[in-house]
Image (cartoon, helix red, strand yellow):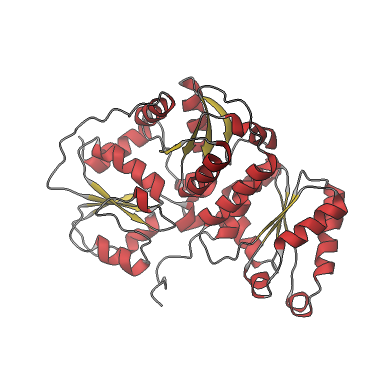
Amino acid sequence: MSNLNIYLPPYAPDYSGCSSALYELGGMIVLHDASGCTGNVLGYDEPRWEDADNSRALVYCSAYRHMEAVLGLDDQVNDRIIQAAESLKPKFIALVGSPVPMLVGTDYNGIAKQLEAKTGIPSFGFDTKGLEFYDNGYMKATNALIERYARKEKTIKGSINILGLNPIDFGNRGNDKAIISLLKENGIKINCSFSMNFTIENIEKSGASELNVVLSEGGYEVALFMKKKFGIPFISSIPFGDGKLFIEEIRSALEGREAERKEVRQDEKRRSIIIGEQVSSNALRKELENRGLTSDVAILFSHRPELLRENDYSFVQEKDIMKIINSGSYTDIVADPLIKQLLRKEDVRFHEMASVAVSSKFHWDEVRPLLGDEMEAFLSEIANIQ
């Protein structure tokens, strides 16, 4: 019962992260469920579906009903998938798992091999269960794409891959394009931007990159995988405001030197807590500390121990969040708008930073632009800079 949420909705699950990683590639994504999980992905965790008329995405439900699960009628389900694939001719087929097929021990890799043998279309099976967070599903899908398509080529000097760029973390209001534009304007070549504004052809070239830049927890495990497979080093960071700190960190890594750090006197009377995903929260903390505001991080999803600081909180539950933000230890809170309802202290300032993984379609139109004057004003507001 310690994981029970009374005020907050369930966070985006692994099958949503998996689907998100595959969404733009022109493949046929089949949610292996009765229909509920498919509705959850498209209605609540995939903001790009609102623009489905202009999308290459092919997202379907396998219609895996109770009787098919109980009686083991998998062939009927497979035949429906094969029939659809032969009609649509997608670039690949991806069978994405959900809770019911988990309970009957579905062999996703085995089904994928059967589908590929019968259709000739590259096929993937993902053992997602709906019991883990979206970052885990994102990692599984992205690693599978790299394993299948990426090639080891001669390193292109000064080139990078972006890892972890997905609408669950960054929304669908232009942050992806702004980040890519910032990098290009600063002369940094992008081989592949996993998983927005990219193609299978981009994935094929990703092994030639000199550096991987991790933008979210979902991309961290991918970076470790690519380091082992291709020897590509990585850093984790996100641009905020003018993006100067982000660009400096990338250039320093490409040049094999330490990024410059300026010492800023911290305001001893104020301290903030940033609640959310670890990589983005850490990057936001750097920006605030550059403005004189000491910050701690509370992580809602998966986390990396090596990225924790002494006063950080890992994997906080609703009851933990309520205790932290009402403890009197913090003057400022940066979190999704839904978390504000847990605040009981009137002398604490709350700064809304919407997360699709938390508040879904309730606030996904309010995901803040990371770059530009609006974010600069937001950072100054948090740091109380007049």
Compared to residue 257, the image places residue 197 above or below, namely: below
In depth, the one of 153 and 262 nearer the eye is 153
Q: Position of residue 306 (x, y in %)?
A: 36, 49
Question: Residue 380, position in %: x, y?
Answer: 26, 37
Quadrant of the drawing holding the N terminus: bottom left
Which residue is at a point 31% across and 58% down the rendered structure image? Answer: 313
Say which residue appears at 63% left-offset and 42% top-offset. Answer: 146
Provide residue 280's location: percent of width, then percent of height: 40, 45
From the viewer's perspective, tell me whether residue 133 is left or right of residue 57. left
Q: Residue at x 63, y 56 (%)?
A: 42
Looking at the figure, which quarter contains the C terminus? top left
| Along the viewing direction, whichever of 225 and 174 lies nearer the viewer | 225
| Left or right of residue 348: residue 366 | right
Look at 48% across and 26% down and name the residue there: 183
Number of marks: 0
**Residue 323 appears in the picture as rendered:** yes
As drawn, is 188 to the left or to the right of 19? left
- Residue 61 seen: no
Rendered view: 109 above or below 197: below
Quadrant of res 26: top right
The spot of residue 36 in percent (x, y) is 64, 67
Q: Which residue extends farthest left?
A: 269
The reply, left or right, for residue 21 in relation to residue 288 is: right
